[in-house]
Image (tube, rainbow, N blue to C red):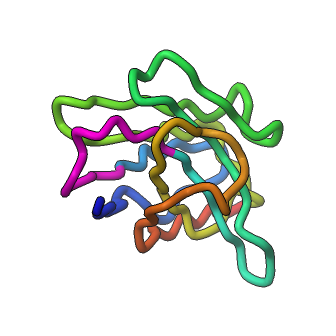
Amino acid sequence: QVQLVESGGGLVQAGGSLRLSCAASGRTNSGYAMGWFRQAPGKEREFVAGINYSGGATAYADSVKGRFTASRDNAKNTVYLQMNSLKSEDTAVYYCAAVIGYWGPAKESYAYWGQGTQVTVSS
């Protein structure tokens, strides 16, 4: 079992930045890849970014490429999502998710999920 806790959300003006964190506990030595997803009111949960266990491979949704960066510190069992040049359409609850060996956009593939953190971008 892996437990995930997101933090770092909040209210920010358009053009601003936030860094989200996802702290993992439990069986973290199994080499989990991580994904970031978001869900806006009335919309499906969508893929934002993914990162493999070593941090050497990442994937991004087209809507965030060049603005968001996923990274991780395995010594701290923490994954990060640096979000720059935020737009109002980035407003959503952001979730991190974990699974072994996959960091792509198929949310059904992820085994563990955090509770989410709210990001609100004011225009």
Viewer-closest of 92 and 102: 102
In the displayed structure image, the side of residue 34 where residue 84 appears, left or right: right
Viewer-closest of 38 and 89: 38
Q: How many marks?
A: 0
Which x, y percent locates residue 28?
A: 24, 45
Image quadrant in which the C terminus is located: bottom right
Magenta highlight on residue 25: yes
User: Which residue sits at x=44%, y=63%?
Assistant: 112
Please, is residue 81 above or below residue 43 in the view?
A: above
Residue bounds of the magenta highlight: 22-34
User: Which residue sits at x=67%, y=47%?
Assistant: 48
Image quadrant in which the N terminus is located: bottom left
Please, is residue 76 above or below residue 110 in the view?
A: above
Residue 109, quarter of picture: bottom right
In the displayed structure image, the side of residue 7 where residue 55 appears, left or right: right
Viewer-closest of 46 and 25: 25
Magenta highlight on residue 67: no
Which x, y percent locates residue 61?
A: 76, 40
Which x, y percent locates residue 3?
A: 28, 63
Q: Residue furthest bottom?
A: 42
In the displayed structure image, the side of residue 76 where residue 9 appears, left or right: right
Please, is residue 87 above or below residue 9 in the view?
A: above
Secondary structure mainly formed by the magenta segment:
strand
User: Which residue sits at x=27%, y=52%?
Assistant: 23
Which x, y percent locates residue 80?
A: 40, 40
User: Which residue sits at x=28%, y=42%?
Assistant: 78
